[in-house]
Amino acid sequence: MTTVPGGRAGRSTDRPALRRCVATDPDHFASAHWGRSPLLSPAAELPKGFDDLLTLAGVDDLLSRRGLRAPFLRVAKNGAVVGSNQFTRGGGVGAEIADQVADDQVTRLFADGHTLVLQGLHRLWPPLIDFAGQLGVDLGHPVQVNAYITPASSRGFAAHYDVHDVFVLQLDGTKRWHIHEPVHRDPLRDQPWDRRADAVAARAGQPPLIDTVLSPGDALYLPRGYLHSATALGGVSAHLTVGIHVLTRYALAEALLALAGDDVELRSSLPLGIDAADPAQLAPHLAQTVAALADVLAKADPADVARRVRGRVWQGNRPAPISPLAQVAAAQSVAEGMRVRVRPGLRYRLETEGDRVRVELPDDQLSLPVSTAPALAGLLGGEPCVVGEIPGLPVADQIVLVRRLLREGMLVAMGDPV
């Protein structure tokens, strides 16, 4: 079996979305800060501000005209989260929805000092869909985007840490941030801050590592585990929190353990009547298990591990949106001269075996004749292609292949034919 290079469509060594978030070269950020230490990036040292991503007017639009439902909005004050029944109601005639955001109720809560948290904006708001998609490609880890809108001189959440890295991008107003060293470095997703609430409270009472005010256009990077709290100063303050759901070495360990399930010795039962609470009875079986596990780990194939962990990344962020009606129309009109390109952010893998080439996708796979391999590599490589100039196939077969990939949502058409 031969693997053809592939993985993420739209990969770029320039990392344009990351450059918007860090006032340093991406390579220096990767070596000096990624997963290690916070980085404060003043607006004057970044390429541009963030008002193209979301504004307060956009927030009002989301809250009042977009049919937002409860899972996409949280409301909190001083660390206490409000029940969704306090800011939702039914959708009205023709909309059998019980949890649609009620703008008038949100207005009262915000006026009373509650912070609004718009969640999952990387799936809702077009500029953030595009930004999050590119940032996920730049980082190689899935991202999510939430917006926090805090009334004047208010605090939504007490000091806490997140189980994912974050970029804080200040949109409007000013907010004072206190950052403290971790009490539990590099926490996993099942190790949230509230399990260490006493240690968090004690650390938050000490002098902060960083005490700074973010103004519009400023950015702050925090690795997971760093304690933080923020208070709006003066007027309304709004910022984006870009959560980075990093793939960890522990995820590789989990994949290796899953592979160990294929070993018959590790699947064997312990003796009848064993007292699992007795260390002396368990000790010899534990030693045998460790030896068997070590043997499995020593023989682990990186390809098998990759197949098990890639789903976390591939499913974490969707590729760029496509327009279903326009996509079908494009597939029906494929002809020589049509320009196409791979769908930005598409995750895939090409593997050839015998007379077939397999395209592995996040939730599907295609099997095509091996003769299409050079054409597939060209079409999915990231650069625009012209039907009639795709390598390795006659024009008639190029049309058939491009039509198939358009219908599968792997390619998108690019304007007028050449």
Image: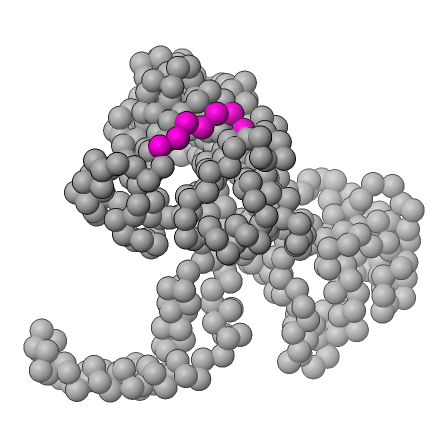
Is residue 212 located in the magenta-colored stretch of the structure?
Answer: yes
Instruction: Residue 150 in the image: state x and y as whole percent.
Output: 39, 22
Between 178 and 196, which is closer to the camera in this rendering?
178
80 up-or-down from 225: above or below: above
Instruction: Residue 201 in the image: state x and y as whole percent.
Output: 20, 38
Q: Is residue 319 visible?
A: no
Residue at (21, 35) in percent of width and height: 205
Residue at (31, 14) in percent of width and height: 112
Between 7 and 357, which is closer to the camera in this rendering?
7
Colouring rule applied to residues: one colour
Left or right relative to 348: residue 300: left
209 up-or-down from 101: above or below: below
- Residue range of the region highlighted in magenta in the rendering: 211-217
376 up-or-down from 343: above or below: below
- Rendering quarter of residue 134: top right
Quarter of the rendering occupied by the N terminus: bottom right
Instruction: Residue 206 in the image: state x and y as whole percent.
Output: 22, 37
Is residue 414 located in the magenta-colored stretch of the structure?
Answer: no
Between 285 and 397, which is closer to the camera in this rendering?
285
Instruction: Residue 308 in the image: state x and y as whole percent.
Output: 47, 67
Left or right relative to 127: residue 219: left
Tally the numbered discs: 0
Q: Is residue 290 visible?
A: yes
Residue at (65, 74) in percent of width and height: 3
